[in-house]
Amino acid sequence: MRIRLCLAALSLAGGAGLATLTAPTASAAACSDIDVVAARGTFEPGTLGFIVGDPVYSALQKKITGKSLSSYKVNYPADLSLTSAAQGNTDLVNHVTSQAASCPNQRFILVGYSQGANVVDNSIGISSAGAVVGSPIVATIPAALEPKVAAVLLFGNPIRAIGKSVTGTYQSRTIDFCAEGDPVCENGGGDVGAHLGYTADADAAAAFAAGKV
């Protein structure tokens, strides 16, 4: 029940603040130095995601100097359907593969919040099956493109509640925020509000990514 309250609250929290926040412009500019690929949370409004994607992209623009940035909003339902995360997984991998072919020197920063973290997990080969709003892996970023992924930024990652985390190839390039008491990423967590507070981690996430590019 707490998890469902968290997911439902995403749309309410975002909608309440959209009138007072100007979101960054998302674009798929051809051959920028870095493409920020963001998978939003369940029902999360905003250009890239009101709670995480938008503030993280703004922070990255400030932290990463001397390089051009573009952004891409993963195209998927971000709802409670059984295939939602799988659709996002497919779209993210297709986007990275297509961009890498068109822009051989481009690198990527992957951003995932809540269900969006499941999308990113799957795309880098860590299955979110069994996690809330998770799914089995349906596509992974090709091994030849792995070095192009500079950083992976995860927030409220549901696989953590089932004892999993990012391991292997991407581990050293990943930062994974789980607020104390967040029931989506902490087994037994009971603080619904904790899942909605990851905007506060945008600067730390951007600083981490800046150190990887």
Image (cartoon, grey):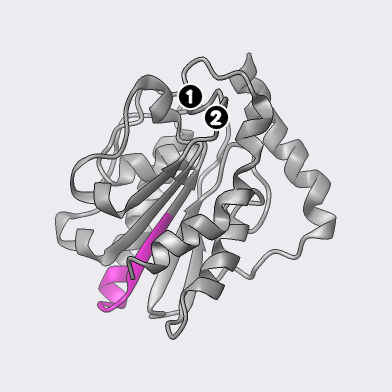
Q: Are circles 1 and 2 on residues that touch, CB within 8 Å?
A: yes
Give 200 or 78, whichever is nearer the viewer.
200
How many numbered marks does the figure carry?
A: 2
Give 35 or 194, whichever is nearer the viewer.
194
Q: In this view, does 3 lie to the left or right of 67?
A: right
Q: Please, what is the three-letter code of the amino acid marked with disc 2?
A: Glu
* Above/below status of 183 relative to 16: above
* Above/below status of 133 relative to 187: below
Q: Please, what is the three-letter code of the amino acid marked with disc 1?
A: Glu
Q: Is residue 26 left or right of residue 84?
A: right
Report helix, strand or loop for mark 2: loop
Give 171 or 41, whichever is nearer the viewer.
171
Query: Which residue extends farthest bottom?
Result: 66
Binning the other alpha carbons within 10 Å of mark 2 as few (below 14), some (14 to 19) or many (20 upward) gives few
**Image quadrant where residue 37 sits:** bottom left
| Image coords of residue 126 (percent x, y) | 28, 37
Give 188 or 27, whichever is nearer the viewer.
188
Report helix, strand or loop for mark 1: loop
Residue corresponding to mark 2: 180
Q: Is residue 10 left or right of residue 18?
A: left
Let me know if residue 100 is in the magenta part: yes
Nearer to us of marks 1 and 2 is 2
Let me know if residue 180 is in the magenta part: no
Counting residues from the start of the chain, the first of labels 1 and 2 encountered is: 2
Magenta stretch in the rendered image: 99-110
Which numbered marker is on residue 186?
A: 1
| Image coords of residue 50 (percent x, y) | 66, 51
* Above/below status of 115 relative to 80: below
Residue 105 seen in render:
yes
| Image coords of residue 163 (percent x, y) | 34, 23
Residue drawn at x 36%, y 46% is 90
C-alpha span from label 1 to label 2: 7 Å
